[in-house]
Image: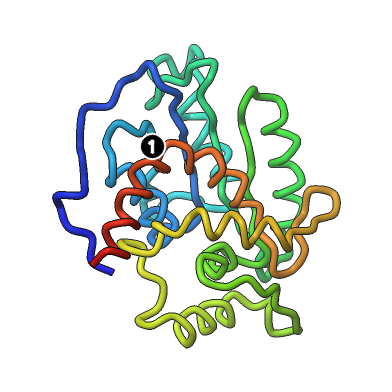
Amino acid sequence: MILTNRLFDRRPATRNAKSIYIFCEGVKREFQYFGYFKEIDSRINIEVYKLSSHEDNSPSGLYNIACNCILKTEENPNPKYEFLDDDELWIVIDTDEDKLQSRKPQIEKLRVDCSKHNNWNIAQSNPCFEVWLYYHFFTEKLSGEELSKSKYWKKILNENINGGFNSQRHPIYIETAIRNSEAVHSEIDNIPYMGCTQVYRLAKVIYPLVMEKFTEILRFVVDN
């Protein structure tokens, strides 16, 4: 699928619309994926925080970064973003355990901390963001012990999608990913089961903003 420049209508964004602020632990793939939606139409108010290599991308680290970027305090009088009442903040995380087994209590604390703020949300994938990418193309919920490993999901994408998942092209199928992932979703105590992802909830916020543009693009792809 080739998306030509003439399909992109980059008009100035307006701050009257709701803004979506996204903080991801993935330095590259997640940043590129969500950045696609802002790139396709600059009127869409999506801000994806760009992590630097020295920043803490753990659940607690992302929360602290979000606070510094959003919350105005005496110590932080000029935060990076102007967060208005209708805006939404999303922290995108994985379940994948670390060697010190510190992620689970951090994620639990993150949920408590985010609940203290209006419109602060969490989108968790189990075990990794590649679960969300998988549902852009496939409907089946996979099973097996290997699925608890992030590298296995990456292998699935690389072996079953020609050229692997391309964040410059494949986010166009976000509606399919919403439908496929929500259809098989299950969770307990806000934690998605293995092979499930909560990212479809964030995608449901993004999709209405790009639906008209994506319909136009997909029609062009089919016709050509």
Please report the residue visible at 54 percent of the width from the left and 68 percent of the height from the top.
130
Q: Residue furthest right?
A: 188
**Which picture quadrant has residue 89?**
top right
Q: Residue 195, image x and y in percent?
A: 69, 69
* Vertical placement of residue 51 versus 120, above or below: below
Please report the residue visible at 54 percent of the width from the left and 44 percent of the height from the top.
62
Q: Residue 26, image x and y in percent?
A: 47, 58
The answer to which of 158 and 176 lies nearer the viewer is 176
Kind of residue at badge 1: Glu
Please tell me whether mark 1 sits on a helix, a strand or a loop: strand
The answer to which of 169 and 85 lies nearer the viewer is 169
**Which picture quadrant has residue 114?**
top right
Q: Residue 143, image x and y in percent?
A: 74, 80
Q: Quadrant of the N terminus?
A: bottom left
Q: Residue 29, image x and y in percent?
A: 41, 62
* Vertical placement of residue 126 versus 79, above or below: below
Please report the residue visible at 38 percent of the width from the left and 83 percent of the height from the top.
162
Check disc 1 and report the residue beneath it: 47
The answer to which of 48 and 135 lies nearer the viewer is 135
The answer to which of 2 and 191 lies nearer the viewer is 2
